[in-house]
Amino acid sequence: APLFGASLGALLSGMLTPTQLFDWGWRVAFAMGLPLIGIAYYLRRKLQEGGISDRTATGDARRRPVAQLFRHHRRIIAMATLLMGFRTVPLYAVVYFLPTYMAHVIHQPMLNGFLASTLSAVLLIALSPAAGIVIDKLPRRKPLLFATACGTAIGVYVLFVAMTPAATAARLLIGIASITALIVLGGCAATVLVLEALPYNVRATGHGSTYGLGAGMFGGTAQLAVAALMKW
């Protein structure tokens, strides 16, 4: 999704004038994203809860995973939702807020911001398999999660402070790549911790629910977090 959104933003920014983009061009991006709703619904309907060791689960647990999840695993859901904040805020700041900031604050072409966001999205995909291998071999994942959470918070602050009209493109790209690598590592660690904490029969529903709740709660706070850190 970040790669699709950033690439589409870069394409529209390169093809349309700023006036066209703000008048009607932004609607094109929303319209092209609508089919993803159907694709996501289809995939979720085809995804089966449970595993080999969960074949003895009751019929109610299989048919009503959402009810089972919020009835018996509320504490895990609450903690996993809060855990989403550490990666959602920096991710939304770098991928979604960055183009607007570069265009309206440091007066760079919006295309440059979308290209930077596209780089971050590509790295998210490219680094995830390697990060998963590393996380899988670690006996303890919480220290790495804490370190990456602190690193992303500091990294986003330094990136936006250093983002001035005089900043070189190489410096900004290195900063974006470093923050993205930390997000990938921490995100993989958080995902594994959440999945291991949930039983098979609610694992897919639990991860999807906490991801959606966390993104909804913390995704829109990225701009506020960045602005607050810069004023502090």
Image (cartoon, rainbow, N blue to C red):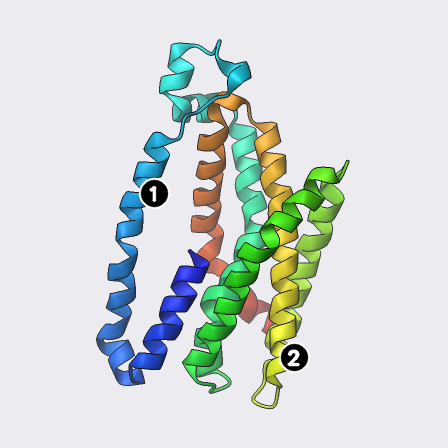
Does residue 44 lie above or below 213 as drawn? above
Q: Is residue 133 left or right of residue 105?
A: right
Dot 2 alpha-carbon crowd within 10 angstroms: few under 14, some 14 to 19, many 20 or more: few
Q: Which residue is at 60% across, 69% downward?
A: 176
* Amino acid type shown at disc 2: Arg
The disc, 1 or 2, on the residue closer to the chain's N-terminal end is: 1
* Amino acid type shown at disc 1: Ala
Dot 1 alpha-carbon crowd within 10 angstroms: few under 14, some 14 to 19, many 20 or more: few
- When asked about the image quadrant of residue 143, the answer is top right
Nearest to the observer: residue 75 or residue 40? 40
Measured as percent of width and height from the top left, residue 160 is found at 59, 75
Q: Of the numbered discs in the image, which one, if any, rests on residue 171?
A: 2
Q: Of the numbered discs in the image, which one, if any, rests on residue 222?
A: none
Measured as percent of width and height from the top left, residue 207 is found at 49, 36
Q: Quadrant of the N terminus?
A: bottom left
Tag 1, which secondary structure? Answer: helix
Q: Is residue 180 left or right of residue 33?
A: right
Measured as percent of width and height from the top left, residue 168 is found at 62, 86
Does residue 167 lie above or below 91 as drawn? below
Q: Which residue is mark 1?
A: 40
Measured as percent of width and height from the top left, residue 93 is found at 52, 65
Q: Which residue is at 70% across, 60% downward?
A: 151
- When asked about the image quadrant of residue 63, the answer is top left
Residue at the left extreme of this rendering: 24
